[in-house]
Image (cartoon, rainbow, N blue to C red):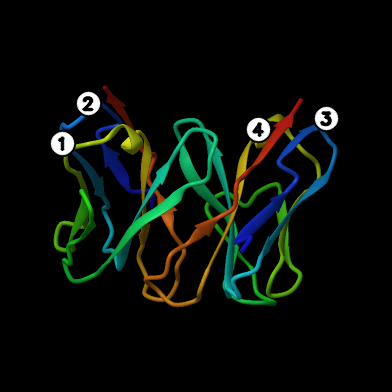
Amino acid sequence: NAGVTQTPKFQVLKTGQSMTLQCAQDMNHNSMYWYRQDPGMGLRLIYYSASEGTTDKGEVPNGYNVSRLNKREFSLRLESAAPSQTSVYFCASTRVSSGNTIYFGEGSWLTVV
Amino acid sequence: QQPVQSPQAVILREGEDAVINCSSSKALYSVHWYRQKHGEAPVFLMILLKGGEQKGHEKISASFNEKKQQSSLYLTASQLSYSGTYFCGTDRIQGAQKLVFGQGTRLTINP
């Protein structure tokens, strides 16, 4: 049982380059999320998708785009990477109703130089 | 709005107790608690829903005071494995599951 799978695990980008972080879950969850984690800042929500075909902004959406490709997959795209986007990115998923556990992927370490 | 956790860090000896608090200035529907080891993903501990319910398993329990918009995580007779950073995530609207996390509390357990 894989749970939430993210790729790549590590990536170094040059300023201005673009890239896409991929996320897939095999738990038949409706809701999926992208968080970023910076030292001392905790987890901050970038975008989330309550269901297939819908996406909504979180706390820090600027500089990112997302695609909910199907129920399983939710990708995060950096169109023009900036050093301020150096962070650890976590994808997560849960069932739609309140009170359910949110499961996190193992994280993607992104460095923008 | 980000909940505020206190303390920011705590160092204990094995067997000692700890309390971590999570406060919000807004009305909450649920509070989630997670533990994260260095370099790993956050791992779910428990969820508390509106109603002041207290939950727990083994030596870790939590309470939710909806009048004060505050949750507390209690770690009793701490073990070395309890070391890590603890995060609370709060949800203001039933059904949204759109968690906002606190900045974390780093817990270090020494032998």
- Viewer-proximal residue among B20 and A57: B20
- Tell me the quarter of the image containing the N terminus of chain A: bottom right
Tag 3 and tag 2 share a subunit = no
Report if the CB atoms under discs 3 and 2 are less than 8 Å apart.
Answer: no
Tell me the quarter of the picture where residue A97 sits. Answer: bottom left
Checking the image for residue A84, the label placed there is 4
**Residue on which the image places disc 1:** B17
Q: Quick one: label 3, few (<14), some, or many (20+) residues within 10 Å?
A: few
Where residue B110 sits: x, y (%)?
Answer: 28, 22
- Along the polypeptide, which appears first: circle 4 or circle 3? 3
Tell me the quarter of the picture where residue B11 sits. Answer: top left
Report if the CB atoms under discs 4 and 3 are less than 8 Å apart.
Answer: no
Q: Secondary structure at mark 2?
A: strand
Residue B97 in sight here? yes
Q: Amino acid at mark 2?
A: Leu
Tag 4 and tag 3 share a subunit = yes
- Disc 2: host chain: B
What residue is shown at x 21% (from left), y 54% (from top)? B62
Report if the CB atoms under discs 2 and 1 are less than 8 Å apart.
Answer: yes
- Disc 3: host chain: A
